[in-house]
Image: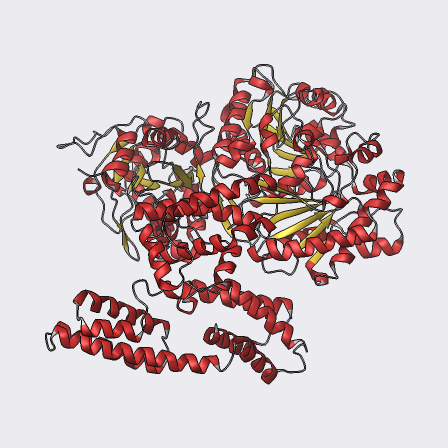
């Protein structure tokens, strides 16, 4: 028997979870059991209708079993089920996330009903969290469900008759198919067509038998995560194969773990756009938070150091840990203190807690208030700042169940703060969290948090390699620029000698330092140097950052340099395109304060605007602000012109590594020479951190081999042949699916290198080969509805631009088999082979679709339909059919030629110019030529063959037009917009 999706992956999952082998003949289904293990039941043996989400008989039995009041009066179970049905039905009105949040309250026992004596409200339990064997755990497959449509998910797991997990298994043997295809099916199809199935969902998973990824409802696919086995020796390499996926599946989907995620690790938060979102933990957050909880419950070791790399989610780890600590009964209502060291971090952390609606969270404003809270024995989650402990009295609270979580522990433990904290809270648990590895020489941090019982001093580690491997963060590319204006390193080191912690300076301290080193300040801020760098930034941004839809940060030596950079940048971009974020002091001149002062509210507004994809703000200019605790996933490139060292260097550059759609790396463009010696700049104990930066020179070195590997799929193909003959030869070289997928894999790697390096001069050597490969790739890429989401990816902005600018071969591939011209039609007419006729018919259908809306082509399309009907009814012979078809084809070619002649009378730009001049009003800017040039440039980048017939193509072009007219030129004239779009649709 062949390997199929069903017998090789789906049945493996069932076997792994329940022990039942569905590939065996006469398989015995497992008997019902109340142990915390999955029992397999065939979908046809589960008593429910196709429209029912819940297995109500199973749920009713659980309600009677777990609730004494319902046990005394079983009819009360129907009242609960009625309420649950109402939550399921409401999903179409309130949305999936809100419905899921409401159902979770029921599942976690937070809902009450008047079932007690004298109608007293008592909690209703759907699940037993104390005695896991008191629940039923059923695994099934091919679970048919109908809402708007009928869908059949591969795997569904039910606890007490409630579906809590949906899984999709894809085939392990087709190279172009990956877990992403399954995740796409769950996220884009099932969640929209059968949303009721997901109202009680804890998580969903997808696998093709090689890799396993999971995600919460409505979670974009780029944020789905892999699950890892704790202390697994092979964990560093991404492993492939059923055995490893099976281990991860069994671990993640263990009923006890799922119920832990349900109760303690599911957050419902509000994002920046005021939308409700659901957050479940990545592996490192789950493991780290549970290690904290277990250590506190055990009570033996009173401290622990956690290093999770920058950007891998420490804020949420703290939320999960605090939430579980507060809910753990044996800790008897503990106090959890979250300590941060900067005001901006305070905002970020408390913002995370507030957005997630965590109960009993207090933020303190001053040391007195914090001391009063501790003296009053407050039992809550308290967010405060480390420096508030500076004057704390000893023995402020000697309770055992106080747990302190210190964020960015390596910076906050300078001096005696750690000792003061230990004296004030002598019996508290102290946990330090950091995003950068702590050097053993940093005695304060290791004294305060590092436990001798922990290997290497860390209780939990999640390194840079771990986060890249798991797609939790992005790799960082380092690009040295303008070597001729790099600073003399010896001069810098000498000038900075008295400031060992130069990196952690405030805005004001940086100014003072530069005053002490007047020569260096004069050099760094010489107008000629700043102008040269800003000119380079403008070119670099327009070529490498803006086309991808990303934004940038400029880091300058001091506050006065911020102003210099802003003024220079305004020569290249509008004033709205950049903003300076820095602090001012009482000693600053009034006019300086008036122009540049920024309070907390204004700073938040700037940050929100920066995060808005549609806003004009493209650059934030800083010197010390926002280098830590600033989370803007849209930030991809940092232009660095300041000396940064050690921890702050790593933290600053990692502002660029957050996940964001279509972003594959963060980039640091270095004008200062910070990374001339990367290893020296990152001298920590952990070797792995020295791999944080991939220098662009390394990427250049990889390009020749990547090009050779990709071209090797076309041995013997003459790449100088143009037109359809050349394209056909290339396509024949990769005729099979396996060969196409192998080519796609190599081209994917090559295109990532190309997008990273563009517009580096080295690409000129390979431009013609890359152009040729890009067009071949485009010509064989599968249609989007059966696409392998991982391998047949979207082309990058630079590659798309290159294809569109050089579309010599590209016109032909739309036809796939033929060029439709007089010779081809004559050939078919004289040799009426039904196979050729079929191909010609397909071509005509495509052509008519392309010209949909044109009356002439509509008539031709109707005639084709009529001809088909006659042939099907046997009213004409096959030879007559071919002859009539050829006649129709000739008329189609003639109609297209006439249309082309009409269109050639006007170039796209001439047509647009004519339109703008015709509709010009007093409000329209005089710069018609510039507007038209901008529109022409951006449309040529985003359009693609046949975009007019694709929803996504129309959306992309409309969005680009809006950016030019509305955002850049502030023309909000809807009539002008509609007319311009109609012209673009016609002429492009």
Is residue 959 visible from the viewing direction of this image? no
Quarter of the image with the N terminus is top left
Residues 56 and 781: in front is: 781
| Image height of 817 relative to 714, above or below | below
Residue 351 image-quadrant placement: top right
* Percent of width and height locating residue 19: 25, 28
| Image height of 949 relative to 365, above or below | below
Left or right side of 582 for 148? left
Residues 954 and 741: in front is: 741
Left or right side of 666 for 394? right
| Image height of 675 relative to 397, above or below | below
Picture colour scheme? secondary structure
* Percent of width and height locating residue 632: 61, 47
- Residue drawn where x is 81% and y is 40% of the image: 510
Residues 99 and 701: in front is: 701
* Percent of width and height locating residue 555: 72, 46
Residues 87 and 900: in front is: 900
How many discs mark residues in the rendered view? 0
Left or right side of 787 for 620? right
Is residue 754 visible from the viewing direction of this image? yes
* Percent of width and height locating residue 876: 12, 77
């Amino acid at each position: 028997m062949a390997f199929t999706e069903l017998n090789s992956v789906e049945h493996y999952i069932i076997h792994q979870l329940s022990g039942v082998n569905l590939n065996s003949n006469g398989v015995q289904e497992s008997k019902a059991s109340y142990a915390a293990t999955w029992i397999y039941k065939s979908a046809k043996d589960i008593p429910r209708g196709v429209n029912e989400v819940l297995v109500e008989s199973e749920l009713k039995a659980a309600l009677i079993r777990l609730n004494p009041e319902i046990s005394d009066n079983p009819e009360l179970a129907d009242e609960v089920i009625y309420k649950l049905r109402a939550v399921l039905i409401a999903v179409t009105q309130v949305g999936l996330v809100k419905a899921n949040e409401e159902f979770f309250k029921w599942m976690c026992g937070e809902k009450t009903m008047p079932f007690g004596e004298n109608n007293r409200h008592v909690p209703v339990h759907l699940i037993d969290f104390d005695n896991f064997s008191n629940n039923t755990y059923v695994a099934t497959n091919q679970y048919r469900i109908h809402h708007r449509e009928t869908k059949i998910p591969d795997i569904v797991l039910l606890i007490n008759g409630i579906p809590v997990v949906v899984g999709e298994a894809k085939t392990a043997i087709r190279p172009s198919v990956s877990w992403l295809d399954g995740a796409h099916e769950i996220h884009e199809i099932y969640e929209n067509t059968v949303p009721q199935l997901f109202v009680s969902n804890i998580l969903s998973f997808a696998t093709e038998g090689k890799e396993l990824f999971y995600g919460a409802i409505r979670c974009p696919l780029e944020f789905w995560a892999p699950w890892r086995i704790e202390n697994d020796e092979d964990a560093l390499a991404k492993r492939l194969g059923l055995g490893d996926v099976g281990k991860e599946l069994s671990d993640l989907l263990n009923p006890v773990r799922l119920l832990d995620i349900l109760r303690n690790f599911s957050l419902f938060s509000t994002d920046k756009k005021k939308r409700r979102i659901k957050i479940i933990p990545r592996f490192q957050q789950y493991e780290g938070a549970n290690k904290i909880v277990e250590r506190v419950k055990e009570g033996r070791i009173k401290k622990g150091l956690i290093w999770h790399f920058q950007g891998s989610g420490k804020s949420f780890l703290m939320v999960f840990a605090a939430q579980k600590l507060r809910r753990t009964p044996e800790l008897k209502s503990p106090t959890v203190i979250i300590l941060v060291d900067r005001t901006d971090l305070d905002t970020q952390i408390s913002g995370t807690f507030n957005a997630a609606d965590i109960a009993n969270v207090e933020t303190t404003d001053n040391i007195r208030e914090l001391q009063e809270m501790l003296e009053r024995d407050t039992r809550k989650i308290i967010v405060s700042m480390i420096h508030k402990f500076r004057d704390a009295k000893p023995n402020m609270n000697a309770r055992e169940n106080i747990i302190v979580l210190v964020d960015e522990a390596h910076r906050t433990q300078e001096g005696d703060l750690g000792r003061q904290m230990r004296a004030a809270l002598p019996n508290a648990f102290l946990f330090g969290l950091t995003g950068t590895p702590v050097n053993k020489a940093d005695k304060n941090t290791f004294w305060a948090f590092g436990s001798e019982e922990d290997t290497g001093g860390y209780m939990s580690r999640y390194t840079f390699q771990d986060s890249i491997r798991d797609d939790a963060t992005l790799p960082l590319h380092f690009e040295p620029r303008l070597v001729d204006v790099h600073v003399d390193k010896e001069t810098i080191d000498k000038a900075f000698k008295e400031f060992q912690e130069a990196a952690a300076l405030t805005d004001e301290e940086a100014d003072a330092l530069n005053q002490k080193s007047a020569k260096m300040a004069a050099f760094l801020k010489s107008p000629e140097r700043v102008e040269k760098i800003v000119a380079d930034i403008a070119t670099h941004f327009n070529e490498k950052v803006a086309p991808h839809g990303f934004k940038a940060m400029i880091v300058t030596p001091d506050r006065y340099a911020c102003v210099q950079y802003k003024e220079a940048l305004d020569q290249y971009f509008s004033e709205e395109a950049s903003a300076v974020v820095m602090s001012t002091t009482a000693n600053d001149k009034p006019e300086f304060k008036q122009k540049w002062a920024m309070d907390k509210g204004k700073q938040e507004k700037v940050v929100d605007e920066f995060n808005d994809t549609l806003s004009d703000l493209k650059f934030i200019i800083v010197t010390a602000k926002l280098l830590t605790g600033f989370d803007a996933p849209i930030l991809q490139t940092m232009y660095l012109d300041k000396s940064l060292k050690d921890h702050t260097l790593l933290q600053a550059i990692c502002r660029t590594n957050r996940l964001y759609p279509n972003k594959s790396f963060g980039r640091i463009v270095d004008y200062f020479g910070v990374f001339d010696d990367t290893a020296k700049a990152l001298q920590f104990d952990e070797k792995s951190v020295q791999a944080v930066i991939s220098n662009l020179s390394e990427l250049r070195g990889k390009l020749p081999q990547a090009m050779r590997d990709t071209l090797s799929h076309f041995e013997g193909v003459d790449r100088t042949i143009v037109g359809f003959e050349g394209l056909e030869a290339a396509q024949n070289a990769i005729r099979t699916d396996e060969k196409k997928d192998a080519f796609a894999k190599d081209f994917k790697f090559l295109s990532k290198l190309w997008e990273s390096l563009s517009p580096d001069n080295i690409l000129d050597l390979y431009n013609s080969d890359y152009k040729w490969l890009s067009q071949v790739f485009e010509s064989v890429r599968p249609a989007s509805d059966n696409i392998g989401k991982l391998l047949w990816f979207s082309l990058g902005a630079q590659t798309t631009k290159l294809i569109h600018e050089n579309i010599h071969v590209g016109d032909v591939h739309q036809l796939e088999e033929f060029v439709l011209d007089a010779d081809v039609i004559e050939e078919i007419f004289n040799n009426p082979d039904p196979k050729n006729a079929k191909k010609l018919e397909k071509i005509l259908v495509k052509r008519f679709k392309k010209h949909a809306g044109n009356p002439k082509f509509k008539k031709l399309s109707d005639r084709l339909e009529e001809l088909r009907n006659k042939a099907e009814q046997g009213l004409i012979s096959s030879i007559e059919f071919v002859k009539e078809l050829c006649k129709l084809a000739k008329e189609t070619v003639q109609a297209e030629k006439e249309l082309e002649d009409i269109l050639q009378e006007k170039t796209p730009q001439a047509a647009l110019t004519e339109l703008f001049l015709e509709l010009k009003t007093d409000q329209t800017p005089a710069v018609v030529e510039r507007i038209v040039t901008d529109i022409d440039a951006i449309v040529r980048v985003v359009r693609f063959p046949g975009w007019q017939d694709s929803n996504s193509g129309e959306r992309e072009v409309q969005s680009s037009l809006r950016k030019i007219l509305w955002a850049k030129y502030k023309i909000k004239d809807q009539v002008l917009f509609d007319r311009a779009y109609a012209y673009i649709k016609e002429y492009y």
